[in-house]
Image (cartoon, coloured by chain):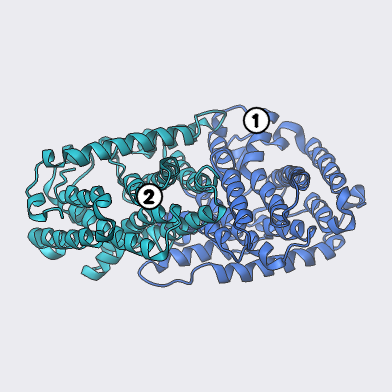
Chain colours: A cyan, B blue
Amino acid sequence: MTNISHARTGTPDSHAGLNAAITASAKAVEAVLDELLPRPHGLHGRVHEAMRYATFAGGKRLRPFLVQHCARLFGVDDAQALRAAAAIEVLHTYSLVHDDLPAMDDDALRRGRPTTHIAYDEATAILAGDALLTVAFEILSDPKTHPSAEVRVQLIARLAEAAGSNGMIGGQMIDMQAPDRRFGAEEVKLLQRLKTGQLFEFSCEAGAILGKRPDADRERLRLYAHDFGLVFQITDDLLDVTSTAEKTGKAVGKDKDQGKATLVSLMGLEGARAEAEKIARRAVDGLGPYGPAADDLRALLMFLLDRDS
Amino acid sequence: MTNISHARTGTPDSHAGLNAAITASAKAVEAVLDELLPRPHGLHGRVHEAMRYATFAGGKRLRPFLVQHCARLFGVDDAQALRAAAAIEVLHTYSLVHDDLPAMDDDALRRGRPTTHIAYDEATAILAGDALLTVAFEILSDPKTHPSAEVRVQLIARLAEAAGSNGMIGGQMIDMQAPDRRFGAEEVKLLQRLKTGQLFEFSCEAGAILGKRPDADRERLRLYAHDFGLVFQITDDLLDVTSTAEKTGKAVGKDKDQGKATLVSLMGLEGARAEAEKIARRAVDGLGPYGPAADDLRALLMFLLDRDS
């Protein structure tokens, strides 16, 4: 089992194997995204351009990584996993495009580049987001994603649930109201579980759905993803406090400026870090039944604990 | 066959039978929508409220009418047709919520009520729109919509196509750029076919998909819907010129104010009216194979020619 206390003081070098796996997964899903997103054409080509601008903005592609590596646990065909991964990534991208809008988080910068409504305009950004959300379901509905209609429709049902008003969108709704409310740790955890956790959960579950695995596997991967989401969020909040805009490619210190409670503001730097490590340990343990096949999924947690961007 | 020249000079009374059918269909789909949309709950209840506010705003529910009446041609279970109809109606509603935003058409009034971003706020309207789009796919993915996963996934694939960047969203993208361009009749027809036509086409096609009908039926209903969409749009443009805000419940004269070309501005009032009648006649003829079972679909075209709101 991975040594957590070592990982905590790890250097980027100690994650060399995982970094290579992340890069390989990102490249693979980007090739599929390039194939699946429409090339700009016609009088409406501007929306295609904006969809691509938002999607091809770099990033670690963590959700595709989760889909691919969970799918591999069950011997799922990689081409199928990559299509499901692409669907989740465009859905994630739509949420970023809309969250960045002036009426929402009003961010001008993401991953070091102008956000979509800055590079184009607000109307185009709204439409590009809508189109990315729509194409996610189109990708999943295609027989190339899986020959079984039953499997495809299960993927669609779960994605709609995870991304909907009781999932990701609900989380963003809570987040929009956060500056006016005094949230405690429970509310902040709920917000984060909805806003970012649900899509991580679906990313992992998608692997089990593609592999036609029983509920026990779906549940196990959901638990891993739930914990993964918490670790992701806490380390993201830590970065918001400790990092620079140069490293993260986006504005930092925003949560505090907006008066939003985070687990870091509620538990303190050290308390939050300790919580993240505790949760990571639990998540690593939960993958026990998959043996060494799940090593990359374990290593990804250690990677998050050491992230600097 | 319905007498078109009579219909042209018809009074509201001459559509009494159809009016009753439209009211019955609207009531039925509204009951299903009430069941399917989440009731406001939790910290994120505001987005549920806004989804309901936008959806329960009256209106003729033409798309649900088309789904229901096309489905009946093939003996589809009414409960199934109403669920598909509800999915299309929430998708249509999302498009109105987003189109009304300040960055898009900037409308403060729809059907005589404040638009969603006025009644709530812009962020909530964006999220409610996103959630309505998402729940459309969730509804279609549910086995209650049809026991066959193959049928459900076909509905989803076609809806995603009709509503996506090469469908409805593409049409809105073209529309946003219209004030800066000098569109001719071909461009205006393309814009409208995408922006409103695609969803009408899917509404009709959905009936054939639910009935597991061969491509010939799907194609025939698509043609009817295509013509229906043109008649709808031309009569809508005529209203924009000739009606009052009081009757239509929204701002009128906007196309001209924004310098947007319409078939009315390009062909003149009489020319556009003649074109609408010609297309309606073609659409009525195309339903020949379905005999009297399609009478309501024929009557709906006559209704559009006489509409005053």
Split into 4 quadrants, where in the image is the C terminus of chain B? bottom right
Q: Amino acid at mark 1?
A: Glu
Task: Tell me the chain of label 1.
Answer: B
Vertical arrangement, residue A79 with respect to residue A213, above or below: above
Q: Position of residue B126 (x, y in %)?
A: 44, 53
At 84% from the left and 39% from the top, the residue drawn is B278
Q: How many marks?
A: 2
Q: Position of residue A235 (x, y in %)?
A: 18, 53
Q: Residue B239 vs residue B306: left or right?
A: left
Return the residue at label 2: A71
Instruction: Kindly report the distance in space between the C-alpha atoms of the residues bearing marks 1 and 2.
Output: 45 Å
Q: Position of residue A22 (x, y in %)?
A: 26, 40
Q: Chain of mark 2?
A: A
Marks 1, 2: nearer the viewer: 2
Work out whether residue B115 can be spotted. no
Q: Nearer the viewer, residue B157 or B251?
A: B157
Would residue B150 be found to the left or right of residue B234 on screen? left
The quadrant in which residue A14 appears is top left
Would you name the residue on which mark 1 appears? B187
Query: Looking at the picture, which amino acid does disc 2 mark?
Result: Ala
Number of other residues with Cα within 10 Å of mark 2, as a class: few under 14, some 14 to 19, many 20 or more:
many
Residue B277 in view of the camera: yes
Between A79 and B158, the residue placed more toward the observer is: A79
Q: Is residue B36 above or below residue B245?
A: below
Find out whether the residues at labels 1 and 2 contact each other: C-beta distance under 8 Å: no
Determine which quarter of the picture holds residue B226.
Answer: top right
Q: Is residue B127 above or below residue B234?
A: below
Circle 2 SS class: helix
Q: Secondary structure at mark 1?
A: helix
In this view of the protein, which residue sits in the foreground, B198 or B122? Answer: B198
